[in-house]
Every structure is written in C-alpha cells, then in structure tokens.
Image (cartoon, grey):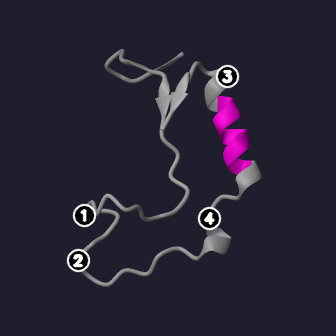
Amino acid sequence: MITDSFGRVHDYLRISLTDNCNFRCFYCMPEEEYDFTPASRLMQTEEIVQLAKIFVEQGVKKSG
C-alpha cells in the first residue's frame, strides 16, 4: 500500500507517455517557447510496463 506523509492511501496511477499533454496546463503548454524532450529520451514501452508492475505490487489498483 502506498501512503503519503498525510496518511492518505494512493491506489491510482497516471502514467504520462509524453512530456506534454492535451490538457493545456501551464506546465505542459507554457506560453513561452519550449523545447520538448525528443522521443528517444522518453521511457520505452518495456520500462513503462516494468514501472507499472512495481506500482501494482505496491497496491495500485487503477490507472488513468
């Protein structure tokens, strides 16, 4: 089970597959010019699956 410093249980995981998303948040889509990370430097499929399995072992039940 994963708990934070306030004792809240976290059983939900959101994995972002890119360094920007389509929600247009200020941290994903800043107004100033921004160079996004090249795809070759992002996590690969096998790494993402391995990380997700570790979270499931720790009690994560849902992902988004």
Residue 53, which numbered label?
A: none
Q: Quadrant of the N terminus?
A: top right
Residue 10 spot, x, y in % from top left = 44, 23
Residue under label 4 = 42
- Total marks in image: 4
How far apart in space, not on screen, are marks 2 and 1 (Cα)?
7 Å
* Alpha carbon distance from label 3 to label 2: 39 Å
Question: Considering the numbered disc 1 on the image, is that residue within a helix, a strand or a loop?
Answer: loop
**Given the image, on which type of amino acid does mark 1 rest?**
Phe
Q: Position of residue 5 (x, y in %)?
A: 36, 23
Per the image, the residue denoted by label 2 is 31
- Element under label 2? loop
Determine whether the residue tagged by mark 4 lies in a helix, strand or loop.
loop
Label 1 to label 4: alpha-carbon separation: 20 Å
At horizontal 43% and vertical 65% (from top left) the residue drawn is 20
Residue 46 to residue 28: above or below: above
Outermost residue on the right side: it is: 46
Q: Would you place residue 55 above or below residue 51 in this image?
A: above
Magenta residues (range): 47-54
Element type where label 3 sits in the image: helix
Tell whether label 1 touches label 2 (CB within 8 Å). Answer: yes
Estimate how packed mark 4 is, as few (under 14), some (14 to 19) or many (20 or more) residues with alpha carbons within 10 Å.
few
Question: Could you tell me which residue is drawn at 25 percent across and 64 percent down?
Answer: 26
The question of residue 49 being in magenta is answered with: yes
